[in-house]
Image: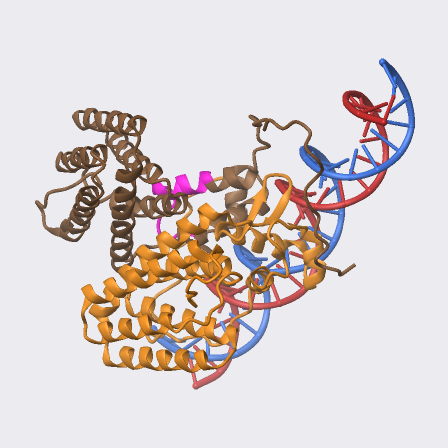
Chain colours: A brown, B orange, C blue, D red
Amino acid sequence: MTSLPSGRRAPRGSLSAAATRRVERPAPLRQAVYDALLELIVNRTLEPGQHLVEAELAEYLGVSRQPVREALQRLQTDGWVDLRPAQGAFVHTPTEEEADQLLAVRSVLETYSAKLAAEHATAADVKLLRKLQKAGEEALGTENVERLVKANADLHAAVAAISRNKVLSEMIGLVDRRVRWYYTPIARPRSRDSWNEHAELVTAIADGDAERAGEVMHRHAEQTRQTYHDRKAPEGSTDSD
Amino acid sequence: MTSLPSGRRAPRGSLSAAATRRVERPAPLRQAVYDALLELIVNRTLEPGQHLVEAELAEYLGVSRQPVREALQRLQTDGWVDLRPAQGAFVHTPTEEEADQLLAVRSVLETYSAKLAAEHATAADVKLLRKLQKAGEEALGTENVERLVKANADLHAAVAAISRNKVLSEMIGLVDRRVRWYYTPIARPRSRDSWNEHAELVTAIADGDAERAGEVMHRHAEQTRQTYHDRKAPEGSTDSD
DNA sequence: GTACAGCTTTTCGCATACAAAAAGCAGTTC
DNA sequence: GAACTGCTTTTTGTATGCGAAAAGCTGTAC
C-alpha cells in the first residue's frame, strides 16, 4: 500500500529502566569500507584524481559492490571523492583555492572552539590537555612524524570536545582531517613553534580566559595558513599543524 | 584481479580546449529522492522520530529501495535522519541543546561570511543584495510566511556566495537549513527588526566595511538565538530569521 | 597521415533476490 | 495474572543481475 505516514513509534513501555549499553555492535560493513577507503586515500595509496572502480574496490576489500557504493557516496558528501554523474568516483583533487578556504573556515571554527573551551573547561579537562601537550612535546623529540601528527590532532580534538558543542566538534573534525590531508605532504612537522603555541593555548584555557584562548588559537591557525602559502619558499618556518 | 592501485588517469590529450558545459544532466535518481524526502521532512509530513521504512518510501516514490537507501544515508550525514544500525532510519528529533549549538555555529560562520562579503563585494553584488532586500521588505507586507522565509534564506545565501568561500558557503547552507527547520514552527516571522538589521548589513557590505558587517551580522544572529531561547515567553519579539 | 564513424568494452545506475537480525506475538508456566 | 520462552513477521544488510551510458578502439575515407 502507498499510505505513507504510517508512523511506527516507540516500541513499548518501560521494562528495565537502566540503559544497558550494548558492547557488541553488528559491524555495519559500509562503515568498515568507509574507514578502509578513507585510510587508503589519506595515506595516498589512492592518489588524487584516480578513478575508483566499484568492482575493483569490492574485490580488493572482499565485499560486494553495494557497501562500496554506499561508502563512496558518504566519502563524497565528506569531500574526499567526487562522484561524477554517470562516470563513477574519483579521488578528490584539492585545489589551492579550496585548501585556503578550508584553512580559513578551520581558523574561524577553532577560534570559537577555543573560546568555548576556556569557558567550560573543568579541572579534569585541563589535566587531559596537559597530558596531551606533554605527549606532543615528547613526540617532538622523536623523528616519528606520524606520532607527532596524531598528537596534534588529539590536542585539537580535545579542545573541540571541551567546548561542549557537539555540532562544532564534528564540523572541526571533518575540516581538520581534510586540512591535514592537504597539508601533510608539504609540512615537515618538526617545528617547535606549534607546540609552544599549544602550551599558551592550554594555559589560557586553564585560566578560563576565553578572549585570550581565542586569540591564541586564531594566531595559531593563521600561522598555519601562512605557512601553507609560503611553502614554496625553501626555508619558511614549518609547522606541524 | 586484486591489484588495487591500477590508476586510470586523464582520458586523453586536449581535444576541444573550450569547456563545453553540458546543459542536460541524466537526472541522478538518488538526488531526486533525496530532495523529495528532505522536502517531506522539512514540511513535517514525515514527523521527527518517525520510522522510515525503505520499502514504503520506495513504493510511495515509485522507485526501488536502492535509491532510497542512498538518499537516506546522505540524509543522515547531513543530520536529517538517524540511521540506527540494524533498525533503519528515523527522522531526527532535534533537542534543545542541539538547536542552540547549531545557532551558535551559524552565528560564527555567518559573521565571518559577512566580513568576507564586505571585502569582496562588487557593484553587481551590492545590486543583487539591494534587490533581495527589497524583495524581503515587500514580502513583509504580505502575510505570505513562506515567501518571507524564502526571501530571508535568499539574502543570507547571497551574502555567503559573495564571501567567495565555497566551503564556507556550503557549510552555511547546511547549517542554515537545519536551523530554519527547528526554528520555523516556533517563530512567527512577522518582525520588521530582522529586515532592518539586514538593511544595515547590506549597507556595511556596500561600504566595504568588513568590521562593521561582521558586527552587524553577529548581532543579528545572536538576536535570533536569543529569540529562540525566549520563545516560551508569550510576547517575546519574534524574528523571521 | 589524419580525422571521422561505428562498434566493442567497460562501468555505472537501478532493480531484484536472498540471508540475517530485530521486533512483535502467542503460548506456556509459575 | 504476570513474566518468560520460542516462533512468526517484518525490515534491514548484502549480494547479484540487467539495461544504459560513456569511454576506448578499430576500420575506413579523404
Name above or below for residue A172 compared with residue C2: above
Q: Nearer the viewer, residue C2 or A87?
A: A87
Image side of residue A16 versus residue B163, left or right: right
Q: Nearer the viewer, residue D9 or D13?
A: D9
Q: Residue at 55% across / 69% down in the picture?
A: B26
Rendered image quadrant of residue B34:
bottom right
Image side of residue B228 versus residue B82, left or right: left
Residue D10 percent coordinates (x, y) = 76, 45
Q: Is residue B184 visible?
A: yes
Name above or below for residue A160 compared with residue B63: above
Q: Nearer the viewer, residue A49 or B159?
A: B159
* A48 within the magenta span: yes
Residue A6 percent coordinates (x, y) = 73, 54
* A160 within the magenta span: no
Check the picture and name the quadrant holding the C terminus of chain B: bottom left
Q: Residue at 42% across / 71% down in the picture?
A: B191
Residue B139 percent coordinates (x, y) = 45, 80
Image side of residue A9 versus residue B172, left or right: right
Q: Nearer the viewer, residue B189 or A82?
A: B189
Q: Is residue B121 visible?
A: no
**Residue placed farthest to the left in the image?**
A235
Q: Residue at 41% across / 52% down in the picture?
A: B102
Residue A71 percent coordinates (x, y) = 51, 46
Rendered image quadrant of residue A169:
top left
> Where does the magenta region start and end?
A35-51
